[in-house]
């Protein structure tokens, strides 16, 4: 029987066993922009927030050569190479390139380029055919690194048929994982109609091949998925049926099993009944923390405010409880990642990532912690923290210059003035 919320130790042991049997390997982007080769560049005078979570460095100097960061330090302590392209950055903050852990193309081929201009240098689409990005890659403009999973694996009656592969039985589950690994998937995504046996088979096969597994659970018991050793949970709503009382959870499951669209309003009705900081929530947060799995809350896509069209007080209260449970996960040490979901109610096109950062801060993360989640935290989840995610010597030069200080106001992370990808400026104002 899978582990229950009262048995976090079992999850720790299982996660350790998986890690020992399958040493993590760096994930593959379907596109990896070439490192820029040429004269050095130097960024002078910015406030440096390096993504590690350490203190910011005022009046910093960062030197880039051949696509790599070669020197970092305070002005006066770093030698600037002769002939370097220097950029004065006083009054601005230098960040690592941002990483979007939950992006959806949804036919908008130009959106990845829009995201790059807003500082997102890497993104992951957890649930789309890899060929869906062919048009975006053929546009001829620099694009973020694309970490794709292929379509999510689902059971009969999938919620999103165009983005799903229905698998029946463990053999089909293993075969699907092998297929998408061959096609360049950087992770495997499991969806909520997939039976437990198929989830287990897919997870084992993905780990055998060195791929992480992430999940959208919704009506599946999250503790059962964690006991299988999955590496990630997409959407805060994946925790709902364990947090809700039995009657509310059963009603929601029955509604979704009958009609996938029941999720749209049914999840709010269920979450409005949840105590997001009571004993059951604390136990579940402890289990999630012990598992080591990352969580991508995607709060922005669920955001409901008083006065929103077709929104009632139940939906507003439910969303507030989602935010509060996200806070509890953070306090329990769960690695939270920033996922935009691309299109959300309270942000314009291209602005969903910033709105998610703002909501994570409202959930209790400090701006520094939110930036860490957006950079080095995501790079660790992608197994790329030796290459990306922080402004440190030896890392690839993915850098973002923003106006003002996002440590004082995370909104300044949206005031992008320059973006560097692999040492090449793709935006410079």
Image (cartoon, helix red, strand yellow):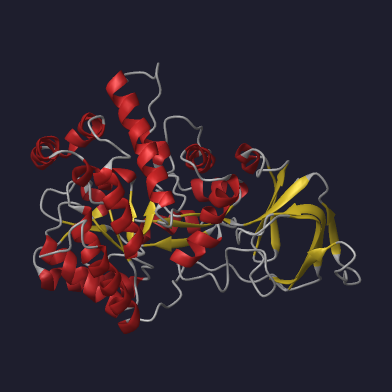
Along the viewing direction, whichever of 428 and 296 lies nearer the viewer: 296
Along the viewing direction, whichever of 22 and 324 lies nearer the viewer: 324
Q: Which quadrant does the N terminus fall into?
A: bottom left
Q: Residue furthest bottom?
A: 21
- Visible residue check, residue 314: yes
Picture layout, residue 419 above or below residue 406: below
Q: Look at 29% across and 75% down and name the residue there.
A: 207
- Visible residue check, residue 427: no
Picture layout, residue 163 above or below residue 28: above
Q: Look at 17% across and 68% down and name the residue there.
A: 200
Q: Position of residue 173 (x, y in %)?
A: 17, 68
Residue 256 is drawn in which quadrant? top left
Q: Residue furthest front?
A: 279
Q: Look at 49% across and 60% down and name the residue there.
A: 378
Residue 50 as seen in the image, left or right of residue 324? right
Q: Position of residue 341 (x, y in %)?
A: 41, 44
Q: Position of residue 5 (x, y in %)?
A: 21, 56
Residue 425 is drawn in which quadrant? bottom right
Picture layout, residue 269 above or below residue 139: above
Residue 131 is drawn in which quadrant? bottom left
Q: What count of labels does the image hold?
A: 0
Q: Position of residue 193 (x, y in %)?
A: 15, 52
Picture layout, residue 147 above or below residue 91: below
Q: Which quadrant does the C terminus fall into?
A: top right
Along the viewing direction, whichever of 10 and 110 lies nearer the viewer: 10
Q: Look at 19% across and 73% down and name the residue there.
A: 175
Residue 21 as seen in the image, left or right of residue 83? left
């Amino acid at each position: 029987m899978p582990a229950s919320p009262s048995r976090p130790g079992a999850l720790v042991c299982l996660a350790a066993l998986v890690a020992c049997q399958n040493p993590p390997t760096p994930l593959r982007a379907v596109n990896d922009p070439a490192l820029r080769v040429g004269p050095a560049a130097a960024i002078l005078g910015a406030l440096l927030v390096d993504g590690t979570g350490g203190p910011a460095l005022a009046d910093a100097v960062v030197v880039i050569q051949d696509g790599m960061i070669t020197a970092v330090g305070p002005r006066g302590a770093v030698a600037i190479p002769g002939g370097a392209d220097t950029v004065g950055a006083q009054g601005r903050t230098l960040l690592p390139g941002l990483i979007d852990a939950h992006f959806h193309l949804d036919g908008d081929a130009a959106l990845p380029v829009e995201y790059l201009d807003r500082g997102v240098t890497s993104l992951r689409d957890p649930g789309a055919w890899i060929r869906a990005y062919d048009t975006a890659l053929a546009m001829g403009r620099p694009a973020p690194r694309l970490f794709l999973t292929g379509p999510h694996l689902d059971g009969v009656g999938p919620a999103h048929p165009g983005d799903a592969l229905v698998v029946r039985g463990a053999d089909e589950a293993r075969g699907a994982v092998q297929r998408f690994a061959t096609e360049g998937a950087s992770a495997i995504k499991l969806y909520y109609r997939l039976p437990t046996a198929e989830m287990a088979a897919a997870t084992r096969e993905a780990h055998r091949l060195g791929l992480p597994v992430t999940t959208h659970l919704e009506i599946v018991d999250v503790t059962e998925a964690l006991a299988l050793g999955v590496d990630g949970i997409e959407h805060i709503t994946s925790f709902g049926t364990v947090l809700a009382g039995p009657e509310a959870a059963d009603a929601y499951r029955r509604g979704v099993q009958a009609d996938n669209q029941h999720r749209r309003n049914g999840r709010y009705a269920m979450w409005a009944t949840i105590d997001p900081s009571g004993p059951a929530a604390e136990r579940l947060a402890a289990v999630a923390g012990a598992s080591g799995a990352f969580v991508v809350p995607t709060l922005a896509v669920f955001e409901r405010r008083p006065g929103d069209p077709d929104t009632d007080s139940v939906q507003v209260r439910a969303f507030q409880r989602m935010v509060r449970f996200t806070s509890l996960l953070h306090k329990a040490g769960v690695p939270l990642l920033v996922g935009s979901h691309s299109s959300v109610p309270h942000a314009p096109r291209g602005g969903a990532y910033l709105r998610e950062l703002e909501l994570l801060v409202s959930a209790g993360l400090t701006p520094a912690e939110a930036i860490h989640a957006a950079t080095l935290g995501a790079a660790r989840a992608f197994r790329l923290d030796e290459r990306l995610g922080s402004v440190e010597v030896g890392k690839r030069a993915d850098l973002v210059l923003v106006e003002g200080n996002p440590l004082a106001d995370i909104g300044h992370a949206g005031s992008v003035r320059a973006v560097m990808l692999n040492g090449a400026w793709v935006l410079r104002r």
